[in-house]
Image (spheres, helix red, strand yellow):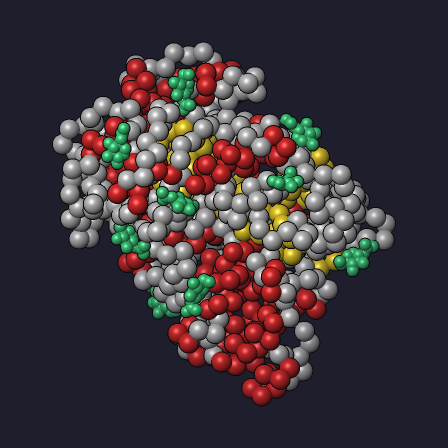
Amino acid sequence: MVVTSCPTWGQLLATSILISTCLAEPIPHTSEVQLRALPNSPSGDYAPAVVPCPQDRPTVRSAQKLSQQETSWLERRRKATVDPMIKLVERNKIDGFDAGAYIRNAADNDLSSLPNIAIAVSGGGYRALMNGAGFLAAADDRTTDSTGPGGIGGLLQASTYLAGLSGGGWLVGSIFANNFSSVEALRNGLSPDTDVWNFTNSIFAGPGESFLQKTGYWFDIVEQVGDKADAGFETSITDYWGRALSYQLINAPKGGPAYTFSSIAEVDHFRNAETPFPILVADGRAPGERIISLNTTVFEFNPYEMGSFDPTVFAFVPTKYLASNFSNGVIPKDGSCVNGFDQLGFVMGTSSSLFNQFLLQNISAADTKIPAIVVSAIEKILASISNDNNDIAQYAPNPFYKYNPSTNPSAESPELSLVDGGEDLQNIPLHPLIQPTRKVDVIFAVDSSADTPYNWPNGTALRASYDRSLLSDIANGTLFPPVPDANTFINSRLNQRPTFFGCDVRNFTSGNGAPPLVIYIPNAPYSAYSNVSTFTPEYTSSERNNIIQNGYDVATMGNNTVDGSWTTCVSCAIFSRSWARTNTAVPQQCVDCFDRFCWDGRLNSSSTSLTENYEPGFIVGGEGASGTKDNAASGLSGMGMGMAVAGVLSLSLAL
Ligand SMILES: *[C@@H]1O[C@H](CO)[C@@H](O)[C@H](O)[C@H]1NC(C)=O
Ligand SMILES: *[C@@H]1O[C@H](CO)[C@@H](O)[C@H](O)[C@H]1NC(C)=O
Ligand SMILES: *[C@@H]1O[C@H](CO)[C@@H](O)[C@H](O)[C@H]1NC(C)=O
Ligand SMILES: *[C@@H]1O[C@H](CO)[C@@H](O)[C@H](O)[C@H]1NC(C)=O
Ligand SMILES: *[C@@H]1O[C@H](CO)[C@@H](O)[C@H](O)[C@H]1NC(C)=O
Ligand SMILES: *[C@@H]1O[C@H](CO)[C@@H](O)[C@H](O)[C@H]1NC(C)=O
Ligand SMILES: *[C@@H]1O[C@H](CO)[C@@H](O)[C@H](O)[C@H]1NC(C)=O
Ligand SMILES: *[C@@H]1O[C@H](CO)[C@@H](O)[C@H](O)[C@H]1NC(C)=O
Ligand SMILES: *[C@@H]1O[C@H](CO)[C@@H](O)[C@H](O)[C@H]1NC(C)=O
Ligand SMILES: *[C@@H]1O[C@H](CO)[C@@H](O)[C@H](O)[C@H]1NC(C)=O
Ligand SMILES: *[C@@H]1O[C@H](CO)[C@@H](O)[C@H](O)[C@H]1NC(C)=O
């Protein structure tokens, strides 16, 4: 947009020419944590741009194998996980088993027996971001006291993959956009009032205090999205949403409009394989489709590639070259190469496009404090976007245009429509992690879904992934351990403490091997009511900190106070699949762990007063904790556990 002079308010309203330079520069979250991905968009701003095609023109490749880049990165990453893994399992010792020696031997002599760990963080808006952040804080050896007794610090450093979806994608995206900063650093900043995650002002109000700052925020967003449209690219509400999100999650002026998802691959931390491999998930919406069904194509974004392992598309394209003119997998001579379409906030917005509604429905709400002049300018633009498709992110040109036309639902469509990764009910991003080619052994699946009336999870996300694994047309070789119905989750308290699914590899006899062991980490009230509504747009620092702390307490079972064996059982979970591969006898302490934490296949599907009004009280205590403490035994019985650690159990339910 070329601007010669500053318009008046009236002109602004009439023409939607929005020039932030005519306003006071908005003050973004000023943090001294100068940590970023890279602002490498060729336009230097939000708009993608045509670039000269490289000598080797980018192509679409079949998903039969992992990419060459991921494969060679993994060689380095798997080695980099060895030391952190040894530290973790030597701290959380298994009696009678030399865990350190086992891992050293695997690293030196037989890499295929080295445990391969992944973490998946569910959707659920800010609740999912904050609760997931609590888990990652507990798993991160950089977090204060996370490697003390009862801690699981180092699990993050020992992990190969870290996947996020929707609100969980904001978490993963924010961490990687900010140079793999720790949760603690993003939460605290380096000095008072410099925190990156400042949710005091809602995403609608924007950062800053003054009228001009707030006005500037929305004018900038409208201008940035306008630039993308002016450059010839289709825009959707997701562009506005992703931009707004970036101001809250990316610590750079104006929400880092030039930061791309693919730039993560250029950052030293990632290049040196010092971080896990980040993956964000979105669902495909076939032309004409409205409701997303379980067999919809699931797409992933990673720093190298975007695409799907599903047999419909079964292909990947370089993330950096999204929006280039691919046709049947190649860019024809007269087609252009494009960079900068994979803008980081846009990718986070794609994975969370369900929140487009949130933006639409709140933008004009009186209490959002968005200046009226901005509201009308934005509404004018939004009005031009088709209403029944307002939850989509438009990827045009379609990277898989004319590719796999016999099975690809969007093969004939010039655009690929993507929606929130949770719309198929698989609200935990497990899909990329159960792909047999990735050979993941164990997934820590953090679930902050709002399934019950009070916003607690009841296993729906796991059931969706299990059910999908049974749909032979779409599963394409993926396996998933069986999980029970929602009533069993609630009656047997499988949603109040970590629960392992798929413990016994002998249960998978199809010859396709076994799926990863799934360690379900459900959001539950350990020390705070972390069940805030998905659509709450603002949080005080103490609300934020309490929910992050609760996620930490869930991850550590209150530093082992709820179950003294928990951290050792995490070590057992890490080794379980590897032991099966190397025919190693399971140490007795781990036999006990699996007895305590594995779902034993028993159902309690009855509708009870508990399932009808699931309203759990604090598990380790918290503000106003007053629940009765009479449910410890029943909380454990459904899991085939004996009465645990006398005295320390305080699993309380406000019945
Ligand atoms: C990213 O973090 C690493 C170490 O944590 C640091 O050495 C590096 O300078 C940081 N990069 C930027 C651009 O801040
Ligand atoms: C969050 O931002 C607001 C201004 O938008 C500021 O007043 C407040 O001090 C910040 N809070 C923290 C904890 O940084
Ligand atoms: C998904 O399932 C529906 C019916 O359940 C079917 O019509 C459709 O063809 C399936 N799509 C794919 C890609 O398998
Ligand atoms: C997955 O789907 C692709 C494309 O249809 C097919 O070539 C491949 O063999 C399938 N893989 C498995 C394990 O079924
Ligand atoms: C390339 O994509 C642009 C944007 O969609 C489109 O306008 C143009 O016609 C395409 N060119 C070719 C050769 O496909
Ligand atoms: C904001 O959006 C959410 C989700 O669409 C909706 O439930 C809520 O009522 C809206 N709030 C206001 C103040 O309009
Ligand atoms: C479980 O969650 C689903 C939504 O995810 C909900 O429809 C169902 O009613 C819930 N069931 C129970 C018993 O909470
Ligand atoms: C099923 O769950 C209910 C509610 O927690 C409990 O009262 C009942 O004893 C359980 N039944 C069995 C067989 O475990
Ligand atoms: C667990 O330990 C951490 C780190 O020392 C601490 O912040 C937290 O309050 C502890 N939680 C409980 C429930 O004791
Ligand atoms: C695994 O197999 C055993 C033996 O067949 C069975 O008792 C158990 O219920 C199965 N577990 C699950 C979770 O299906
Ligand atoms: C959070 O859960 C508690 C009980 O588990 C319930 O009383 C409260 O109403 C819930 N809050 C929200 C916002 O759903």
**x and y, in percent, of residue 253 in the image:** 51, 65
x 49%, y 80%: residue: 372
The structure residue drawn at horizontal position 20% and vertical position 45%, both measured from the top left corner, is 655
Q: Which one is nearer the viewer's eye here, 602 or 324?
A: 602
Farthest residue to the left: give it: 647
Coordinates of residue 374 in the picture (x, y in percent):
53, 77
Residue 458 makes an appearance in the image: yes
Q: Quadrant of the N terminus?
A: bottom right
Direction from residue 444 to residue 290 in the image, left or right: right
Q: Position of residue 521 (x, y in %)?
A: 37, 38
Tell me if 102 is positioned left or right of 110 in this view: left
Judged from this view, the residue extending furthest toward the right is: 333
* Residue at the extreme front of the image, as rendered: 607
Q: Is residue 415 left or right of residue 242?
A: right
Residue 317's place in the image compared with 383, above or below, is above
Name the residue: 56% across, 65% down. 240
- In this rendering, is residue 150 above or below 319? above
Relative depth, front residue between 473 and 272: 473
User: x, y percentage for residue 387?
Assistant: 60, 65
Q: How many marks on residues?
A: 0
Residue pictured at 62% horizontal, 47% vertical: 284
| Residue situated in front as seen by the camera: 27 or 241 | 241
One can see residue 76 in this view: no
